[in-house]
Amino acid sequence: MAETTMTKIQGLAKQRGFIYQSSEIYGGFAAVYDYGPYGVELANSIKREWWKEMVQFHENIVGLDSAIFMDPRIWLASGHVSGFSDPLIECKNCNTRLRADQLLEESGVEADEKMSEEVINKLLSDNKTKLKCPSCGKNTFSEVKKFNLLVKSNLGDFNDNWENPVYLRGETCQGIYVNFKNVLDSIRVQIPFGIAQIGKAFRNEITARQFIFRTREFEQMEMQYFTAPDIDMKTFESWRKKRMDFYLNLGIKKENLRWHKHEKLVFYAKEAYDIEYKFPFGFKEIEGIHARGDYDLTQHSKFSGIDLSYTDPKTGEKYIPHVTETSTGVGRNLLMMLCEAYTEEKINNGETRVVMKFPRNLSPVKAAVFPLLKNKPELVKKAKKIFDLLKKSFVCEFDDNGNIGKRYRRQDEIGTPFCITIDFDTLEDNTVTVRDRDTMKQERIVIDNLSDYISKGLL
């Protein structure tokens, strides 16, 4: 059932222009996806809501857009060059490369990507007979080895052997840390304060799966909140509540969300939780909230030689700020929205309609405008006039292709909250029929009141 649901969602995402396989006409490029016209609008809506919540609504959080390419020493300081890796295992029969933790999981052994290499090796040893290569079915595998996920580039290196590689950033937060002092010196902020960023990151995943849940190119929405050492855990708990409330306020069902506490923390972390969403393939992480201590700024101070400490203007106390991190992915949020919204309903005469019940403020298209008949110039002209009026305030679509019933079904699958039909009565009384996506009820609305009607309906 879960596989069927996921297959349907993937099919609809392609058919209705949400998500395409990258380089599809060349056979597709693994683990990379393109967002189509409606996918772009949905992603932009998600990013707008996140930015409003994190920056617009907090006077002590500011925005940043740091570069994708950075000095390679940044990745040495952060530990990515030496420690940013996944457990790689190879089938000796067909040479298929796999992630050891995923192979264990798919073989019915409880495993986790955050497990240490030692634990994974023991599980592999204890479950040799259970493990089978998904490509050839054999169970002869190499020893586990670490595979670094950073994507290398030869930017600025004119040697063929890439002697001095730079990296496409593996995460966006390092750009925030190395700009901490710039923001502090140029903007009127004092601790506690946060820096938020939305941007692309890249990881050379061994095997990517589950549609857009895990990809090699993705977009992160991260906020790093800097505090004094004595209040960092209080701040951490505060952000835990705020981030869960964010998803609940978007309309995600409470039973589809849960907390996952990290039992084994990296050496510098004080606490770490994930918010998980119940996808058709199970509960998986959509956001991490981490208490990172003073590790990040300490490391960059050490490697750069620049003092990144903070002096409290009231007490004169000097310290390296502690960090609470909130980090989520645009793609995972978008996939969550597709899964949460996907609905099959029985309607007239036993017919089933597919409708994407997105939160209305996130819907890719807010209103669709239909002339009742496309071959009646007076109706088309009036519909165009209404469309031109509404598009100044909302993302709208003009649709005159097919009969009204087909247009309704198409807009249902896009997730459009309101369909507006211009008929012959419109020419007489200046009213239109507005059909609600969720209830399918229709209501006559005066044209002059349309904008207010839609605005209230999107709240």
Image: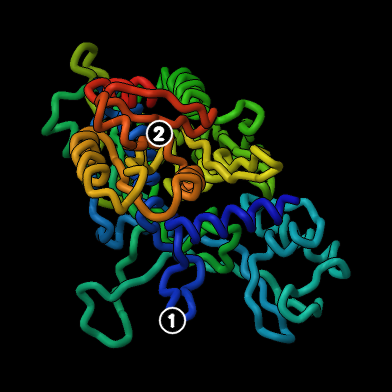
User: How many other residues sit within 10 Å of disc 1, few (<14), some (14-19) or many (≥20)?
Assistant: few
Q: Residue at x 28, y 76 (%)?
A: 154
Q: Residue at x 51, y 56 (%)?
A: 212
* Residue found at the far top of this picture: 314
**267 sits left or right of 159 in the view:** right
Classify 55 as above or below 238.
Answer: below
Q: Quadrant of the C terminus?
A: top left
- Residue 242, given in percent of the width and then of the height, sits at 46, 22
Q: Would residue 77 be seen by someone viewing this image from the given angle?
A: no
Q: Residue at x 46, y 41 (%)?
A: 415
**304 sits left or right of 7 in the view:** left
Q: Nearer the viewer, mark 2 or mark 1?
A: 2
How has the structure been colored for display? rainbow
Residue for badge 1: 26
**Disc 1 secondary structure class:** helix
- Residue 137, given in percent of the width and then of the height, sits at 80, 78
Q: CA distance from mark 2 to mark 1?
A: 38 Å
- Residue 451, given in percent of the width and then of the height, sits at 26, 26
**191 sits left or right of 325 in the view:** left
Three-letter amino acid code at the position of disc 2: Phe
Give 439 or 110, whichever is nearer the viewer: 439
Q: Residue at x 32, y 41 (%)?
A: 369
Three-letter amino acid code at the position of disc 1: Tyr
Quarter-wise, where is residue 176 in the image?
top left
Classify 410 as above or below 147.
Answer: above
Classify 47 as above or below 204.
Answer: above
- Residue 102, given in percent of the width and then of the height, sits at 68, 60
